Image: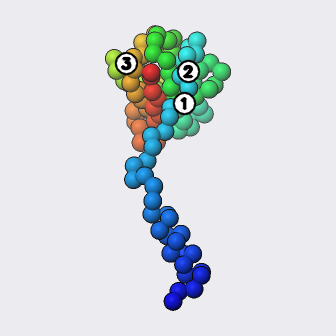
Amino acid sequence: MPGIAGLAIVAGLVAGCGGSSSPKAASPGPRQHPAALVGAVGHDDGFNISLTDPSGQAIHNLAAGTYSLTIKDESSLHNFHLTGAGVDKATSIGATGTSTFTVTFTPGTYTFICDPHSAQMHGKFTVS
């Protein structure tokens, strides 16, 4: 006959077998509607890329609409490439500087990458 410690282990294992077999999808968070968007890539020639509002808050769940997008491309090693439903805007590899685009977002998922380093430098956000 198993001891109390043995029964506790078996009970713990049985209890641990329950639960959902499919993970719950993460919420993109509250809908954001900033005055403009700021993309940045290659600060100090680093392998970094981001999309934020003007105050530096990362974009996760953008409200559908038309926005001014300013891209700060700080490295000739990288570029900033934004794609999604009806959107395909990019800066040049080999050049640096600031570019401004007007972009209209419709509901869906959008991605931003550095084309030559897409495995390391990428991000995505939802438009709702």
| Type of amino acid at the residue the image marks with label 3 | Val
Question: Circle 3: is it few (<14), some (14-19), or many (20+) Cα within 10 Å?
Answer: some
Q: Secondary structure at mark 2?
A: loop
Colour scheme employed for the rendering of this structure: rainbow
Q: Is residue 61 visible?
A: yes
N-terminal of the pair, mark 3 or mark 1, is 1
Q: Secondary structure at mark 3?
A: strand
Q: Which mark is residue 32?
A: 2
Crowding near pointer 1: few (<14 within 10 Å), some, many (20+)?
few
Q: Residue at x 52, y 29 (%)?
A: 60
Label 1, on which residue?
A: 29
Q: Earlier in the sequence, mark 2 or mark 3?
A: 2
Contact (Cβ within 8 Å) of mark 1 with mark 2: yes
Q: Which mark is residue 87?
A: 3
Of circles 3 and 1, the one toward us is 1
The picture places residue 21, in percent across and down from the top left corner, at 39, 53
Q: Residue furthest right?
A: 55
Q: Give how far apart the Cα atoms at labels 1 and 2 are.
A: 9 Å
Residue 74 rendering spot, x and y as whole percentages: 55, 26
Out of 53 and 94, give the one closest to the viewer. Answer: 53
Q: Say which of 90 and 92 sits in front.
A: 90
Q: Estimate the spatial distance between the alpha carbons at disc 3 and disc 1, rounded to whole Å.
A: 23 Å
Q: Nearer the viewer, mark 2 or mark 3?
A: 2
